[in-house]
Amino acid sequence: MSKLDLAIRGGTVVTASDTFRADVGIRAGRIVAVAAEIEGATREIDASRLLVLPGGIDSHVHIAQPSGPDVVMADDFASATAAAAAGGNTCIMPFALQQRGMSLRRCVEDYVRQAEGECHIDVSVHLIISDPTPEVLGQELPALLKAGYTSFKVFMTYDDLVLNDRQLLEVFEVARRERALVMVHAEGYDAIKYMTDRLERAGQTSPFFHTASRPELVEREAAHRAISHAELIDVPIMIVHVSGREAMEQIRWAQQRGLKVYAETCPQYLTLTANDLEGLNMEGAKYVCSPPPRDAASQAAIWEGLQQGVFQTFSSDHCPFRYQSSEGKLTPRGKTSFRWVPNGIPGVETRLPILFSEGVSAGRISLNRFVELTSTNHAKMYGLYPRKGSIGVGFDADITLWDPHRRETIRQENLHHGSDYTPWEGFEVTGWPVMTIARGEVVARDGVIVGDKGAGRILERDISAYAAAGEKS
């Protein structure tokens, strides 16, 4: 055997199924050995007293995405991938958004061009379908799916993104035929528009009323409608950023009936509540995201879903804007009504520490479930497994060394994203990533980016094993 490039020695390896003490040997960016003792490496890293985890995969992030008139997203690919790496991630999955009236292929090509040469870690791109014309459904979308863009997102709300029921059914039909996995933002458009208009007439326009405009029942209704459409077409779907019990129970109902309905949730639904949007003046704008955070009972329901397997993935839904900016949360129109406040919060760098601390350290979930929710299931769900998502011979050497006992306080001044705030300012966590290794190279060490911009690749993906229609499971 030729000499190893790197050996990670003395750590506790954790996968979705096993926890064991082992050394890990790496050559040419791949794991080539997992054994009790490994000798003969050019470099060694001492992982004693550390956990050796698969690098985090965040399959739901928004980067450099068009966000409406006079609003600019806070992260480009360089800053977002740096933040992700510092937070223990080795792969992220943003969205190429089709703007209405434009070619889907052109939007994808333009978006990917922005990423080229800019990424610290690997990136793989989903699609967003906003304008499902006959040309898009008949030509562009099938061709892109065959080219390795094997998943796409559809929206049931937002003026410039919403698809009506007929359009959803047509898009689902293409997904079924091509074996693409559909991600669904499930909130009812007309109900939200009605509630927004009513609140504005009553003068209730501060950021806090964003939560009242999107009550949990509009998420429940849309989730049920999406599930019904998916059942009619017989296509698997992933309902993303689920915020509480009502939508979760719709998903559990579908799963118990054998439908291929999967679910994702996010840190904001475990740790934030609607009360966070009550800040004086426009402080509440920092927490405006959709669906909005709910209450303590909703948090308990989300933990229940994580523990019982209703949720397959835990993502950040990183969607960063600057607070102190007229092109961000303090856009002049946002001061007139919550409806104009840029919708989204930063979170790619803090996702893993929050779930580890609140889940593993607090005794709510196991280490293995943590790995499953933050890495393995993302790779499996979106066609990256077995290249990524676990530690074993043949996998990319994407590894995070984790100190399970290290206590940290989340501070904006220590983060790498392009936003100028974090919703978790002052949040204390137990468990912290101390080193991130992407394809065998150290990219982040103790919160400092040491890898090269441009080292990350833009990945095509295989068809997801979870995207097959037909047999109910």
Image: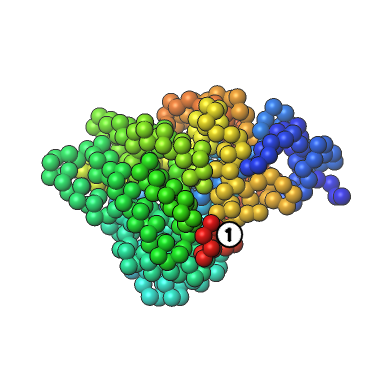
From this view, report whether residue 49 is shown above or below residue 212: above
Classify residue 152 as left or right of residue 25: left
Q: How is the rendered protein coloured?
A: rainbow
Q: Nearer the viewer, residue 227 or 285?
A: 227
Classify residue 157 as left or right of residue 305: left
Q: Is residue 235 visible?
A: yes
From this view, report whether residue 144 is shown above or below residue 85: below
Q: Where is residue 47 drawn, in percent x and y?
A: 71, 32
Q: Residue furthest front?
A: 257
Q: Nearer the viewer, residue 42 or 376?
A: 376
Q: Where is residue 282 drawn, in percent x and y?
A: 26, 35
Q: Image point 20% across, 47% down: which residue? A: 195
Q: Where is residue 435 drawn, in percent x and y?
A: 63, 36
Q: In which quarter of the view is residue 464 placed?
A: bottom right
Q: Which residue matches tag 1?
A: 465
Q: Image point 29% across, 46% down: which residue? A: 217
Mark 1: secondary structure: helix
Q: Where is residue 444 drawn, in percent x and y?
A: 61, 38
Number of numbered discs on residues = 1
Q: In which quarter of the view is residue 95 placed?
A: bottom left
From this view, report whether residue 343 is shown above or below residue 409: below
Q: Amino acid at mark 1?
A: Ala
Q: Residue furthest right?
A: 1
Q: Image point 60% across, 35% down: which residue? A: 367
Q: Nearer the viewer, residue 91 or 414?
A: 91
Neighbour tally class for label 1: few under 14, some 14-19, many 20 plus, Cα within 10 Å: some
Q: Image point 40% across, 65% down: which residue? A: 232
Classify residue 425 as left or right of residue 147: left
From this view, report whether residue 83 is shown above or below residue 460: above
Q: Is residue 323 visible?
A: no
